[in-house]
Image (cartoon, rainbow, N blue to C red):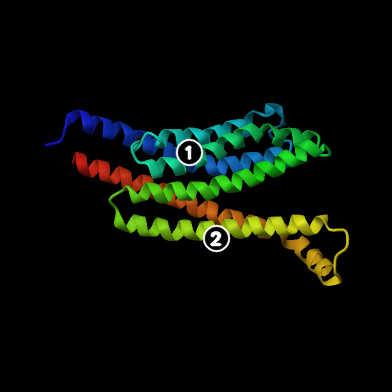
Amino acid sequence: MYDPVLKAELMRSLNRLVKGLSALFWGLPLALLVCVKTATTDWLKPFGIAPPLLVNTLLFYGLWQIGHFQRQERVWHQSLDRAKLLSVVNIGLSPFVYWWNQVPQMPLFSVALGLLILSGLLFLFNLNHVLQRLTAMLPDETLRHETAFFTSMNVYLLLGLLILMAFYATVQEMVVLPEIVISFLRAFETVRQWVFILLLLLPLAMTMTLIWKIKEVILTSVFAAEG
């Protein structure tokens, strides 16, 4: 026999979990699109700092909602808290996207924008750990294996992107470079944007796919239980 009170509480937490996953699913591509467009174009200029603030707040809202699921699980909430902290950092740095667009020569704005990019990548990195911890608490064995595989792949791709960005930034600051390095930089400059986009969009797309699949598994399980 199920306790009606416990069952009602579980249904409320599952409802919030689904809402949170939906917010994360839509928030991830919106955050990337809005921040890039705010920084590089004048499309969203009339709205000032609001667009990047709102989309990053949506991501925090998603994490806050899924945090109501299995509150007693310490390891799950530790990974969730790390993602929340990075989400708060992203919210705090969001206005600099608009300010850098207006005054790109200001060193403070450039540094803040760089920190936002780094924090955003670390957020996506930690979000994959959150998804892995979440599926460990769900009864679907196939979903657990798929999530473990794809989150591991995402982690390696994001680490590769971080290492490449750090190497590129370091080399750019060097005054004297070997001729072979200069030739490499010239060749890399033509494809730099596409390499960075590819290394970012692949883990982003796989993360969104995992979020959608987890949400569908939860909804299917709820409807099956009610039926």
Write the residue at 88% across / 62% down. 176
Question: Foreground: 226 or 177?
Answer: 177
Q: Are marks 2 and 1 in contact (CB under 8 Å)?
A: no
Residue under pointer 2 = 156
Which badge, 2 or 1, comes first in the chain's sequence? 1
The dot on residue 81 is 1
Camera-side mark, 2 or 1? 1
Q: Place residue 227 in its image quadrant.
A: top left
Looking at the picture, how far across and down is residue 29, in whole percent?
55, 44
Which type of secondary structure does the marked residue at label 2 adopt?
A: helix
Q: Place residue 201 in its image quadrant.
A: bottom right
Looking at the picture, how far across and down is residue 213, in whole percent?
39, 50
Looking at the picture, how far across and down is residue 125, in whole percent?
54, 50
Question: Foreground: 217 or 150?
Answer: 150
Disc 1 crowd rating (10 Å Cα; few below 14, some 14-19, many 20+) is some
Residue 205 as seen in the image, left or right of residue 199: left
Write the residue at 49% across / 54% down. 206
In this view, which residue lies farthest toward the left? 1
In this view, which residue lies farthest toward the right? 176
Image quarter hosting the N terminus:
top left
The CA distance from mark 2 to mark 1 is 22 Å
Which type of secondary structure does the marked residue at label 1 adopt?
A: helix
Looking at the picture, how far across and down is residue 49, in whole percent?
67, 29
User: Is any atom of residue 121 visible in this view?
Assistant: yes
Disc 2 crowd rating (10 Å Cα; few below 14, some 14-19, many 20+) is some
User: Is any atom of residue 36 visible in this view?
Assistant: no
Task: Give the amino acid at mark 2.
Answer: Tyr
Residue 137 as seen in the image, left or right of residue 35: left
Write the residue at 47% across / 56% down. 151
Task: Give the amino acid at mark 1.
Answer: Asp
The dot on residue 195 is none
